[in-house]
Amino acid sequence: MTILSALLGWAAPNLISRQLTHHVATLLFFGFGLWTLWEGFTGDGEAEDLAGVEAELDAAMKSKTGTDSKGSKVDDDLKKQRRPMLTQFFSPILLKAFSITFFGEWGDKSQIATIGLAADENPFGVVLGGILGQALCTTAAVLGGKSLASQISERMVALSGGVLFLIFGMQSFLSTGS
């Protein structure tokens, strides 16, 4: 998603004027900053989504534990034979994680901000920074998940993100857009 966003941001100034692209990116940074701060102050968060995902995962884990251990090897082989072609080569969890991340990120604030940043800055730096940032966040989520979530409040993350978007907007506003 980061590469697609950066490519779109790189191409945008070739489709519309660089100055208009710069102004749109600046407005997006300010808009996202205010939007994220609003979410942080009003408490509108993703807690309901998290609870839904946790319930779904709990139900999936309970359904898997109901199998007999003696027949599990045979059952696993039969399941693998009946799986669609794509899942023959990739594990179902890899495909599920990929699709959840890919479609979850499609059109969100970070993707649109990446497009705006790549329109104004070096797309290679945007891609590298975006991928490193995503890798760090994903690694922290996978390794620390629930314990990390109990240490860091969702409100603080939203407020910090909002302030960062406003800082990026101010930096973009103060630059010439050349």
Image (tube, rainbow, N blue to C red):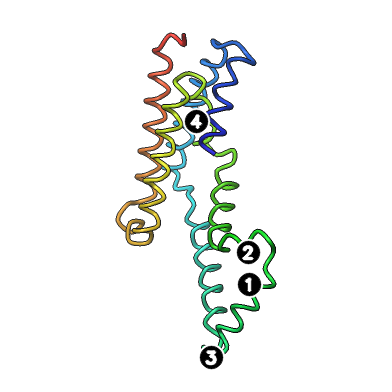
Q: How busy is the neighbourhood of tag 4: few (under 14 within 10 Å), some, or many (20 plus)?
A: many
Please state the horizontal and vertical placement of residue 19, each as a whole percent of the image: 54, 10
Residue for point 55% across, 19% down:
24
Q: From the image, state whether disc 4 or disc 2 is nearer to you.
A: 2
Above/below status of 105 relative to 76: above
Residue type marked 1? Lys
Checking the image for residue 80, the label placed there is: 1
Query: In the rendered image, which residue does mark 2 sit on?
Result: 88
Which sits in the foreground, 177 or 96? 96
**Marks 4/2: CA distance?**
34 Å
Above/below status of 79 relative to 151: below
Residue type marked 2? Gln
Residue type marked 3? Lys
Which sits in the foreground, 126 or 148? 126
Q: Earlier in the sequence, mark 4 or mark 2?
A: 2
Q: Secondary structure at mark 1?
A: helix
Residue type marked 4? Thr
Which sits in the foreground, 75 or 30? 75
**Marks 1/3: CA distance?**
17 Å
Q: Earlier in the sequence, mark 2 or mark 3?
A: 3
Please state the horizontal and vertical placement of residue 53, each as a whole percent of the image: 53, 62
Mark 2–mark 1 CB contact (< 8 Å): yes
Residue for point 49% across, 58% down:
50
Above/below status of 158 relative to 116: below
Checking the image for residue 70, the label placed there is: 3
Checking the image for residue 114, the label placed there is: 4
**Marks 4/3: CA distance?**
51 Å
